Structure formats: structure tokens, C-alpha cells
Image (cartoon, grey):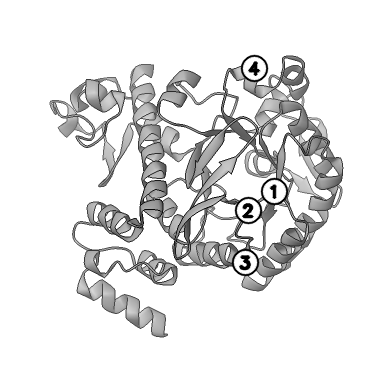
Amino acid sequence: MVLGRFNRARAARLILPHFVCETPLFMPVGTQGTIKGLTTNQLEDIGCQIILGNTYHLALRPTSELIDELGGLHKFMNWPRALLTDSGGFQMVSLLHLADITEEGVTFQSPVDGKPMLLTPEESIQIQNRIGADIIMALDDVVKTTITGPRIEEAMYRTLRWIDRCIAAHKRPKEQNLFGIVQGGLDPVLRDICVQGLVERNLPGYAIGGLAGGEDKDSFWRVVAQCTASLPESKPRYVMGVGYPLDIVVCSALGADMYDCVYPTRTARFGTALVPEGTLRLKHQSMADDTRPIDSTCECMVCKNYTRAYIHCLVTKDAMGSQLLSYHNLYYMMQLSRNLHSSIIEGTFPKFVCDFLQKMFPEGDVPEWVCNAMEVAGIDISSCCTPSNTKLKIYASSG
């Protein structure tokens, strides 16, 4: 249910079996049914609405059968709010050598005993039905965006054929929402065919897949803009694998609603904090005697109680360092989501975007791709761009 709009940006209420969510929203990735180093109570405290679980990892350990036997993933991990599981296809292609995709499914070597295994669209859905997440993802034919040629077209058409097999296999449509995934690489024609094909299936929601995999930012935002413009107004739009705050602000301006990424927690484990100015490297020697909080404007438990010097001392040497940074980084992402939602509803979204960009780019050197995307989104950011950047923007748009 869309509650507010600013041009293409939307703030909505997403009603799921376990939780009523507010969008735009960011979903942390809990690979094995856990966000590394944080309890489910802490995740509730910081305002996390949906956690993402990886079907591939959960099917290996502890197995979907055991999760089902123990009452589903919500009960197993003691998480009362919403869950989303991916299809398992991405991990097969990214983690495993010799993954082979045919019409039947994805064949890969078992990491347990090296034997060949097959994941079909039907089996992916059966596993996800047993895990019991509020949102489940269709198995798609995953191709890196940087690949071009006939393989992209083959993958897109196969993704459309597989969605029908996923729909047919889905045994819990009342309790679990099946999202389709738009593929088609960087080709606007293929993306359009895929969007239209999925929309015809009238699914509960739609994901934009195959991005955040190394393509240039100009191609990235254009694909998001194209897909959000054609997807139904009344259904959620999920850009997969997007976790940089700047990307989330841009995609939200273009009409996307949901995001997931390991970035905030992974970067925390390497000693980096997310702050309005961008990032803060706590490992840096200059932090050793810095008695300030990570971010003086942040209301999180970490910023209220600990100094940069203390976290510097712990980072990479003690588990507590990555736990505190993970907590702060996820708080930052949840606060960003809340601010996006409230500014769209209150009609102050352009001001929010400008303030966000001003803090991140105090010299006014906002990247050209951001300027171009905001122009398409109908957000005037001229006040936070240097004149040379504005000229670049006008030149680029007239070309």
C-alpha cells in the first residue's frame, strides 16, 4: 500500500505474514540464519524489519528438512519479524566451480562429497516452502552483468520459463509471497521483455536481478530506472544485492522499495564504519586516541557508549570490535531507511537527498551518474553540486 510519493519515489506499507514493514527498506543478510555477531533482540532494537536467509547455505546446514521439523526458520532462529529467502542459484554460480546451467536446472559439485547435484526450480521452491520465509525468490538463470551476447538473452528467456515451474511448484502461496526476478543484463529490450513477461504472471512482488556485479554506475541506474518505470505501482520492487547508502538513495528516488547486501556487516568486520560523510576506517592510527563517538549525530547504543579509540583497540583483534561496528552499521542503514520513508511522506524528500549528498560530497563533487539519475527522478540537486558538475550534467543529458 503506497502511503506517499515524490515523483517516482514511494513510501509504502508492505503487509507480510509476520510483520508490517515500511519501505524503502534495507534487509541485512543472515546467511546461516544469523546476522554475524548480533542477536535477534538487537536486530529488533535497531528497527530491522526483514532478514534475508540464503537457501543454499541453509539447505546444506542445518538442512531445510530439519528447519521444517523444528517449526520453520522464524522459530528456529527466534525471529518474530519477516524473512526473505533467496533461491540458492546465485551462490551456486558465484561460490562453486563447474556450476553448469541447463534447462533442467543448476548442476553443481556438492561441497560435502564432490558429487554432482542438481537444483531445479521445483526443488528451490520446495526447500523454501520448508524454510517458511514470508518472501521467497524464484530460481533464475544468473549471469554476470558484465557478460554480453547471446548468453544474456538465453538466461532471460530461461528465467521466464522457470518462473512458471516455480509458480506450479509453490505449495504455500497464502503464507509465502513468491517474487519473480527481472533479468536481461544491460540490454533495455531484453529487460523490457522480461518485465512484461513477469508482470503478466501477476506475482506478489518483483526483483531487479543481475546488477551490483561490476557494471558501471551509469548502466546500473539506467536499468533500475527502466524496470521501476514498467513494474506495477501496487507491488513491491526489490533491487537485489544493493547495499551502498548512495545507491539506495538513488534507487529509492527512481522508485525502488527494497534492498539487501552483505556490505554493512562485511565492511564492519574489516573495521570500517558507515557515517554520513561516507566511511570511517577505525583501523587507522589516527583513531588510537580519538575520544569521539563513531558519529556524533548517531543515536545508536555504540555511539552513545564507546569511543573511536576503544573500537580501534578492538577492531580485527577481538570479536567485540566487529560486533559493535556491525550494530552501528546496521543501525545506520535502518535509520537511512526510516529517513527515506518519512521524508517521502512529509514531502521533504528533495531536501533529504540534498542534505545526504552535501554531507557525502562537501566539495560539491557529486558523481555525474548521480546527477543524471536525479535528473530522471525529478529531484533538483543543483544546490549541492559544483557549477562544473551541473554543466557536465546538462551536457550529458543533451547528448
Q: Which residue is mark 4?
A: 76
Q: Quadrant of residue 183?
A: bottom right
Task: Give left or right: position of 358 versus 42.
Answer: left
Q: Nearer the viewer, mark 1 or mark 4?
A: 1
Residue placed at 20% from the left, 24% from the top? 307
Amino acid found under the numbered disc labelled 3: Ser
Q: Is 391 placed above or below 241 here?
A: below
Q: Secondary structure at mark 2?
A: loop
Q: Which percent across, then down, holds residue 135?
A: 66, 39
Compare residues 264 and 236 and report the one nearer the observer.
Answer: 236
State which tag comes first along the sequence, 3 or 1: 1
- Percent coordinates x, y for residue 45 in the rendering: 41, 24
Whichever of labels 2 and 1 marks the residue nearer the N terminus, that label is: 1
Above or below, comparing residue 269 to residue 280 in the picture: above
Which mark, residue 235? 2
Q: Secondary structure at mark 3?
A: helix
Q: Please report contact status of discs 2 and 1: CB closer than 8 Å, yes or no.
A: yes
How far apart are labels 2 and 1 at the CA level?
Answer: 6 Å
First in sequence, mark 3 or 4: give its number.
Answer: 4
Residue at 82% x, 56% y is: 161
Q: Tell me, yes or no, whether the two marked residues, 4 and 2, touch with CB atoms within 8 Å.
A: no
Examine the rendered structure and indicate whether residue 150 appears above or below residue 198.
Answer: below
Where in the figure is residue 293, as x and y percent of width and height?
Answer: 20, 29
The x and y percentages for residue 122 are 84, 40
Q: Residues within 10 Å of mark 4 (few under 14, many from 20)?
A: some
